[in-house]
Image: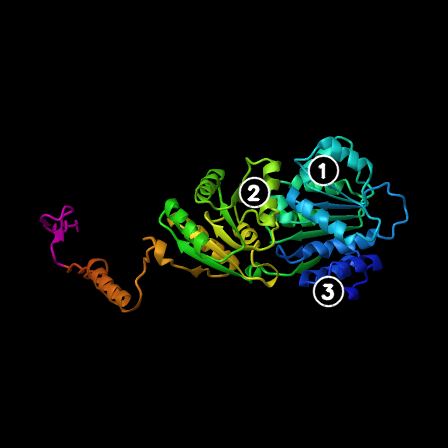
Amino acid sequence: MFSQFALHERLLKAVAELKFVEPTPVQAAAIPLALQGRDLRVTAQTGSGKTAAFVLPMLNRLVDLKQKRVEIRALVLLPTRELAQQTLKEVERFSQFTFIKAGLITGGEDFKEQAAMLRKVPDVLIGTPGRLLEQLNAGNLHLEHVQVIVLDEADRMLDMGFAEDVERLCNECPNREQTMLFSATTGGAGLRDMIGKVLKTPEHLMLNSVSQLAEGTRQQIITADHNQHKEQIVQWLLQNETYDKAIIFTNTRVMADRIYGHLVAKDYKAFVLHGDKDQKDRKLAIERLKQGGAKILVATDVAARGLDVDGLDLVINFDMPRSGDEYVHRIGRTGRAGNEGLAVSLICHGDWNLMSSIERYLKQSFERRVIKEVKGTYTGPKKVKASGKAAGVKKKKADKKGDKKVVAKRKPTAKPKPNAPLASADGLAPLKRRKPTPTAE
């Protein structure tokens, strides 16, 4: 029960109004420590309820402030504008019975309007690192009174090249009392480096291991002969699987546009997202998907980062992601909150090794699936090693061959007899022994 947490009554009223009853595992683990003011490093999958895990303790710190609103007290950094917008909504929902105000600073919006909002000095500022730095450099942003910083989806921010921006913004908050870092994956050396620089003796909470990130999602692979064959499989899946919303991931913009074109030609309600799309197109695509105006989204990884859509229950990896962490982020969008989901990866000859490395990373083995209506000829790499009796027979034959050719024993060299004729250096004719020269007596 949320009532067990030492939260302000106004926040508990909002929690009850929103019909939050049982905290999720990440909320149960993180909220008590965060209320104590501890620095936290939390690994929890997307869709696990981690936003409330940092929003409620953050608001609890600010709810009783008696000062007039003249300084920004809390800063939340996120990798994408969509995720920032979603977090702003959560902050506003939980703070509805308080006087706390929140503001949003992201790219793709009017710079002067954002500067005007900053002059009103929100208690909580939510934003993306790039645009926040632009406002800072323009002299519009002052962070010296920030008490708490939250870095959400920190691994994504690093992947997008925001490491230096994040460190700079953290350094602009010298009086902060608490820093909380959340990520969906354990990350690599870059994330460990950031943790060492911005957190002070943090409490580490591992709410899920990598191998448990998608327990509610069936993970399958289907082998394909080439990209055209992959397109046929995609069409079959969209026609025959049961889903409310689906997302198809590609590694390139060109392929995303190609698949989108084929879907539209077959009268599917679909949208496409990639780096060439402007903010207006992104907003339209996400809103249509959320409202049910479109059932299918074709996207590249960069465009889909921070995407949070309810009812997304089918993920198709047209192209295999380039890393295990990227795979986790893709399939983490389905099978949320105990619901079932399906993630299907299409594997050509060139994808097999990458797929195998991701299996090893996750310590999982994906389900192999064959669809007879669109079955191809490629079924995986050919086995080099024979097994069973055949292997034993081959080994014996090889051993015998090797005995004859390689392991032939040499005959021991015979020692010359004392009176035997010596061989010449060229081995052609024996040399006569010279009689010993008589010595003078």
Image quarter of residue 32:
bottom right
Q: x, y (%) of residue 122?
A: 80, 42
Q: Are marks 1 and 2 in contact (CB under 8 Å)?
A: no
Residue at label 2?
Answer: 302
* Secondary structure state at the residue bearing disc 2: helix
- In this picture, residue 307 sits left or right of residue 204: left
**Magenta-tinted stretch:** 419-441
Image quarter of residue 278:
top right
- In this picture, residue 254 sits left or right of residue 108: left
Residue 433 within the magenta-colored segment of the rendering: yes
Q: Nearer the viewer, residue 4 or 19?
A: 19
Nearer-N-terminus badge (1/2): 1
* Secondary structure state at the residue bearing disc 1: helix
What residue is at 67 percent from the left and 57 percent from the top?
49
Instruction: Mark yes or no: residue 72 visible.
Output: yes
Question: How would you classify the magenta stretch by its main secondary structure?
Answer: loop
Question: How many other residues sit within 10 Å of disc 2, few (<14), some (14-19) or many (≥20)?
Answer: some
Image disc number at residue 21? 3
Residue at label 1?
Answer: 132
